[in-house]
Amino acid sequence: MTRSKQQRRRRIQDTIARWSIAGFVGLAGALGTLQTPARACGAPVLDRLTTHTVGDGETLDAIASRYGLSVFTLTGFNPALREISGGALPVGSTLQIPPYNGLRVRAEAGDTWRDLADRYNVRADILFEQNGCETVPETVFIPGATRSPVTPPARPTPDAADPNPDEIITTYPLAEPTEAIVRYGWVLLPGREAVNFHSGIDLVAAVGDRVVAAGDGTVAFAGERAPYGNLVVVNHANGRQTRYGHLGSIDVAVGETIRQGEAIGTVGQTGNPDVPLPHLHFELRSNSALGWIADDPQPYLDAILGFPRSPLAARA
C-alpha cells in the first residue's frame, strides 16, 4: 500500500471513529422515537388511493381481480360492502382502491412501528417505508395484512432467494473496498435526535472515484432524483435492482445494457447526503408485490470480497 493510500485510509478511520463515538450506530430498540423522514420514501400508501365507480353487472370478485387485490382488502377499505348480500353492487357507487393488499387501521396511543409490526406480524422496515417514513400517524396502512394478521411472504435474502445470488450481484461498486460510514437499517445519525431507516449502505470514497455496476443488467433510471441527487438505477435478473446515489457524474443512459464492472459514473456529493464525508450511497432491492423492497447489501458485498457468509437472522 502506498503512503498516500495509507494516509487516506487513516483519515477515514479517524473520521469513522469520531462519528461512532458520537452515536453513529443502529438503534433497533429506539424505534418509538422515529421523527425524521428517511431516505427515498415515496408518499404514504394512504395518500395514493384511487377510486372505482361500479358499473352495471360488476361483482366484488371481478373488481378485486381487476386491481390485483383480495376481497378482504376491498371490504376493509369500503366497509359498506360488508352489508351487501348476494354479491350485487350498487351501480354508480364509488369504491376506494389501494395500490396494494393490506389494511387501514387506527394506531393506538403511544404505538411505535415496532409495536405495529409485532401486532400484525409484518416487517417493521416495510411498514415504515409504506407509510412514508414518518412518525406513526393516527391511521396506518398495514401492508399484506387481512382481517386476521398473517405473515407476509419472506423477502429474498442471500441465503434464500436465487439458486446462486452471487451470480447476479458479482462486483464491488467501487474500484477498491472501503469502509461503510452508514449501514443499512435503523440508524441514528450525528446531530439528529431520532432514529430513521437507511435503505442502503454509504461507502466512503473520494469525489471523482469511479463507480461501477455491481452486476449485469439494464439501466432503468439515470438522472437527478431527490434525495439521491444524481442517481443510476440498474435492473438485474431475477427481480434484483441496484441503486447508486449522490453521483458527481453519470456515464450511462436509460435502456442501456451494462455488464458487471463497467463504469456508470463517479462519486459526488449531489442531493441530500446523510453525512458530509464523500461517499457512494449503494442500495440493493428486490421486486415484490409491494414494489422494490430494500435489502441489506452488506452480505452480498462480503461475499464479493470473499468473506464467509453467515446465515442472516430474520429481521422484523
Image (cartoon, helix red, strand yellow):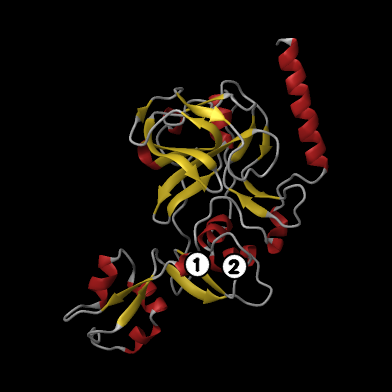
Q: Residue at x 48, y 74 (%)?
A: 104
Disc 1 is placed on an element classified as strand
Above or below residue 77? Residue 296 is above
Residue appearing at x 57%, y 35% in the figure: 299
Name the residue that disc number 1 marks. Answer: 142
Residue 91 against residue 25 in the figure, above or below: below
Marks 2 and 1 close (CB-CB < 8 Å): yes
| Residue 9: % across, % down | 73, 22
Check the picture and name the quadrant holding the N terminus.
top right
Number of dots carrying numbers: 2
Vertical placement of residue 273 versus 113, above or below: above
281, 171: nearer the viewer: 281
Q: How far apart are the alpha carbons under marks 2 and 1?
A: 8 Å
Q: Please state which amino acid type lies under the numbered disc 1.
A: Ile
Q: Nearer the viewer, residue 205 or 20?
A: 205
State the image coordinates of residue 51 (x, y, percent, origin top left).
34, 74
- Report the side of 107 relative to 55 (left or right): right
Identify the element where label 2 is drawn.
Answer: helix
Q: At 47% from the left edge and 52% from the top edge, which residue is drawn? A: 154
Of pointers 2 and 1, the one earlier in the residue sequence = 2
Q: Quadrant of the C terminus?
A: bottom right
Kindly identify which residue carries mark 2.
Answer: 116
Side of 288 relative to 303 (left or right): left
- Name the foreground residue: 263 vs 162: 263
- Which kind of residue does numbered mark 2 sit on? Leu
Among all residues in the image, which is located at the extreme left?
Answer: 57
For the point 66% across and 45% down, the residue is 274
Where's residue 177, x and y in %?
A: 62, 24
